[in-house]
Image: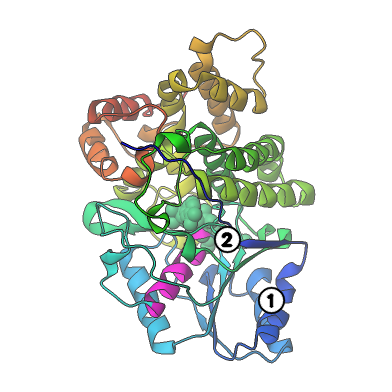
């Protein structure tokens, strides 16, 4: 195998500022768009993020259509519905106002509207064919309302693929939004449980990308277009991931405790974009790979704060963090210094720590944080037991895009042990 020698950083342009949502109408007018579609989370219809967006379009006389059939945590059906709508509308620009669910739906609708084909063609292999996005898409302006997925910065769109009971997605740098408008005012109404779950997603983006295998350990692609978005840890992603982690460590408890803490909310939004730039190029690994069946096999868990979803779900951030302590105990031996560095940022005293203890030290910090943020106590608390482990492993095995970035390779047997270890956190 020839090893990779290059890495490539791709990220959306980002505009950050309190009230910046109100600028989107002027952007659209300036660019001359006359047929704009605005994807909105219907739960936000009467709240600031959507009201400010639509008022701004009207003030700038930009004609628009609203699409609000967003599923919280999209499925292949909700994606197809959005694609049909976009295709019929032949829009010349997209705006997405909502969390990752809304932004990811807009990305997929834009892609298939521009380059129609069978749905699985662009979906990650081996679930789909993993065909690269053929060319430029229509401009997409993403306005996140959670802090969060970092989807405003990434070329990734995730959905729940019902036939496999696991999530998967489409990943290519051409999917990334043209501009992310990151306005801290947009998370003021976010329920505190969503602040906790989406904030722990930020935390995992940061730690997973920082501990992913180095980019130079992957195989070199035949041509640049085949270089994946998720390339492994690299010096530029490290900067963004570590700074995202520092901000998260400092502000996540405050953002959860008090939604009116403006400094904490704004800092978590920055952290989300920082970690998005980091993981959007380095990738995530086992906690995310294992989260996809944890979300996809849900039976009846109805989390507080997610009432607007209207269905049983293990929210994305929860499905990821529940696996994280067991995973980092397992992966630490591959790069103990990085695990210790992350633990130190989270508050551990590592001055006399042994490398062999790195995994436990990091996972203890994570468990403390999960407890403080009132997370469910392990996979058992969201409805899983040991008898579900074979199905959870089956749902993780096809997630090559992320699992192969683990610094320590995990066999099916290892995954079973990790799921067992994630049943109870404390
Ligand atoms: N594209 C990527 O790079 C990427 C990365 C991580 C996760 N994801 C995906 O993103 C989805 C999760 O997105 P998310 O965590 O941002 O949450 P979300 O979009 O699913 O929203 C979560 C809940 O919060 C509500 N909500 C959101 N913002 C609100 C606000 N400001 N005020 C009041 N209520 C609000 C929503 O109605 C919903 O009930 C998952 O499908 C996940 O797999 C994508």
| Residue 225 lies in quadrant | bottom left
Against 413, residue 393 (above or below) is below
* Residue 108 magenta-highlighted: yes
Any mark on residue 24, and which?
1
Please provide percent x and percent y for residue 353: 60, 10
Q: Residue at x 46, y 26 (%)?
A: 328
| Residue 47 lies in quadrant | bottom right
Main SS of the magenta part reads helix
Please provide percent x and percent y for residue 313: 39, 52
Against 350, residue 397 (above or below) is below
- Which residue has dot 2 on it? 152
Q: Quadrant of the N terminus?
A: top left
| Label 1 secondary element | helix
- Tell me if residue 54 can be seen: yes
| Residue 143 lies in quadrant | bottom right
Q: Residue at x 36, y 77 (%)?
A: 115
Colour scheme shown? rainbow
Provide the residue span drawn in magenta: 100-114
Dot 2 crowding, Cα within 10 Å, few <14, some 14–19, many 20+: many
Please provide percent x and percent y for residue 323: 41, 33
């Amino acid at each position: 195998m020839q090893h990779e020698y290059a890495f490539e950083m791709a990220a959306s342009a980002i505009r950050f500022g309190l009230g910046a949502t109100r600028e989107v109408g002027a952007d659209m007018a300036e660019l001359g768009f006359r047929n704009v579609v605005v994807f909105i989370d219907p739960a936000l219809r009467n709240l600031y993020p959507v009201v400010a967006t639509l008022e701004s379009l009207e003030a700038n006389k930009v004609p628009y259509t609203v699409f609000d059939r967003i599923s919280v945590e999209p499925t292949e059906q909700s994606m197809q519905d959005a694609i049909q709508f976009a295709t019929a509308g032949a829009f010349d620009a997209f705006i997405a106002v909502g969390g990752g669910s809304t932004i990811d739906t807009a990305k997929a609708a834009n892609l298939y509207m521009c380059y129609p084909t069978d749905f699985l063609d662009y979906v990650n292999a081996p679930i789909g064919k993993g065909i690269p996005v053929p060319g430029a898409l229509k401009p997409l302006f993403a306005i996140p309302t959670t802090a969060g997925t970092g989807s405003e910065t990434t070329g990734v769109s995730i959905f729940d693929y019902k036939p496999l009971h696991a999530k998967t997605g489409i990943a290519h740098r051409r999917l990334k939004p043209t501009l992310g408008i990151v306005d801290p005012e947009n998370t003021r109404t976010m329920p505190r449980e969503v602040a906790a779950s989406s904030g722990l997603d930020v935390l995992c983006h940061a730690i997973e990308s920082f501990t992913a295998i180095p980019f130079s350990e992957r195989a070199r692609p035949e041509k640049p277009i085949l270089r994946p978005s998720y390339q492994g840890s690299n010096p530029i992603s490290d900067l963004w991931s570590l700074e995202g982690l520092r901000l998260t460590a400092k502000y996540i408890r405050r953002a959860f405790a008090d939604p009116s803490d403006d400094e904490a909310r704004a800092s978590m939004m920055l952290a989300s974009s920082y970690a998005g730039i980091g993981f959007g190029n380095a990738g995530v690994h086992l906690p995310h790979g294992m989260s996809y069946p944890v979300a996809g096999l849900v039976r009846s868990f109805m989390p507080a704060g997610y009432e607007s979803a209207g269905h049983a779900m293990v929210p994305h951030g929860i499905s990821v963090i529940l696996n994280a302590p067991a995973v980092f105990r397992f992966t630490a031996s591959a790069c103990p210094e990085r695990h210790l560095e992350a633990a130190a940022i989270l508050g551990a005293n590592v001055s006399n720590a042994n490398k062999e203890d790195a995994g436990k030290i990091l996972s203890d910090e994570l468990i403390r944080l999960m407890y403080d943020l009132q997370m469910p106590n392990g996979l058992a608390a969201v409805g899983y037991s040991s008898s579900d482990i074979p199905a959870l492993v089956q749902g993780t095995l096809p997630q090559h895009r992320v699992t192969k970035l683990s610094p320590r390779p995990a066999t099916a047997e290892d995954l079973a042990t990790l799921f067992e270890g994630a049943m109870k956190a404390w």
